[in-house]
Amino acid sequence: MEYHSPASFDEASALAAQAQGVTRFLAGGTDVLVQLRSDLVTPDTLIDVKRIAGARDITRNADGSWTLGVAVSGAEMREHAELGRDWPGLVEAMDLIGSTQVQGRATLAGNLCNASPAADSVPAMVAAGVRVTITGPDGTRQAAAEEIPTAPGKTSLGKGELVSALHVPARGDRGGDAYLRFIPRTEMDIAVVGAAVNLRLDGETVTEAWVSLGAVAPTVLLVEDAAAAIIGTTLDDAALAALDSAARAACSPIDDKRGTVDFRTEVAGVLARRAARFAYARAKGDAK
Amino acid sequence: MSRVHVTTTVNGDETEFLCDPRETLLDCLRDRLNLTGAKEGCGTGDCGACSVTLDGRLVCSCLVLGVEAEGREIGTIEGVAQGDELHPLQRKFIEHAALQCGICTPGILVAAKALLEKSPDPTEEEVRYWLAGNLCRCTGYDKIIRAVMDTAAEMREAV
């Protein structure tokens, strides 16, 4: 295995474009190094992105939007009070992943590119409208977070392409987000179902909404029907029931040791409702 | 396989080693630098027995490559005591009998020290969540938590 620690994303991309065999990018390493250690994936070329300028930065832009470096750890996000005030659901989703030790290394970009359908931060990113910059041999392009994973462990990134920055929209007024997951214990487990909701209010009425579900399909889903079910409502019981059924209708989960198809489908509806109520309370300023 | 030359700082001392790029920081500490305090439990970041600090941040050294340590500052259990003088956490772990077999203990001490530096007056809940990534199969955790809480109280009085 060759290890590289390039100084720029262009250099990282060129290294990957020229590499033979299996190439992996190393951010926090909490997936890549586990796969290496358990002989699941032994890269021929490993490209560490942590020393690239800006990779460790959390930046609030003039318009209120955020640019997050690809090597920013969960712990760094958690410690950033202003980011947590704007996007508590996104920060909490990332914070749910693993132990203190894992939080010291794990990154949003890595969670996205590992392409697990159960990745906790990904529904929160998708609901928040996170976009990523991708650097490749032909320059840079942008994509929505939900366009990156295409199947378990597979991404839409081409040879020589890597995510080089994450962009979180400006929070704006009367907005709120939340992510909830079901696990059979209180800590340190993989989501059986995850649900994220991000919404905006005008008065008491939901004017914009995004609903995303994890671990109920081969990739994290952006469920437009579920968002449509609550837009224009005050999140009354009828709207929540419509949200619940739209969320359940979007599910195509697997049966495994963590949960059956029926269980996952039902829990997706329940968590979508609870996350919507939580995001709604945050948007009104009733909850932190 | 060509070896990589790594220069890094461990417990305040600049040091260097040669390693294969696939070697973990844990293996480099143990096999290249003879610092065998960090233990390998699971090797996949689940048990915390290999906990060290990397630029002050608590990490599992089994999930860091040795080559990543270039130019960084590593803190291990060997740097916790000052010569023969034990760190208050180490004293309290003995006092409370907060260990049995001891394999998890170096990792728990490094992790608990990182917590108390960040949060000198933690709640019991905070301690339990912070140490959730440090598995102990002997003690049932209760004495560990009590030892950490007691250390925190003593260290606050000392300030």
Image (cartoon, coloured by chain):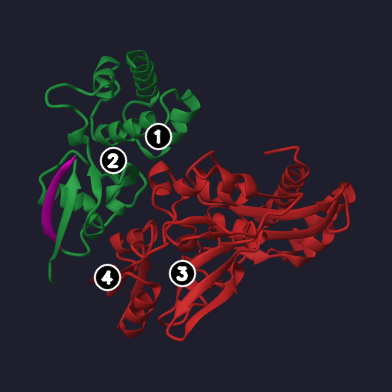
Chain colours: A red, B green
Q: Nearer the viewer, residue A211 or B102?
A: A211
Magenta span contains residue B128: no
Can residue A218 be seen from the camera position used here?
no
Which residue is disc 2 drawn over?
B49
Q: Tag 2, which secondary structure?
A: loop
Alpha-carbon span between mark 2 and mark 1: 11 Å
Closer mark to the observer between disc 4 and disc 2: 4
Alpha-carbon span between mark 4 and mark 1: 33 Å
Q: Are marks 4 and 3 on the same chain?
A: yes
In the rendered image of this protein, does residue A161 appear above or below residue B110?
below
Disc 4 to disc 1: CB gap under 8 Å: no
Amino acid type at circle 1 is: Leu
Q: Which mark is residue A4?
A: 4
Relative to B44, is A196 on the left or the right?
right
Which residue is disc 1 drawn over?
B131
Q: Chain of mark 1?
A: B
Q: Chain of mark 3?
A: A
Q: Residues within 10 Å of mark 4 (few under 14, many from 20)?
A: some
Disc 3 to disc 1: CB gap under 8 Å: no
Alpha-carbon span between mark 4 and mark 3: 16 Å
Can residue A113 be seen from the camera position used here?
yes
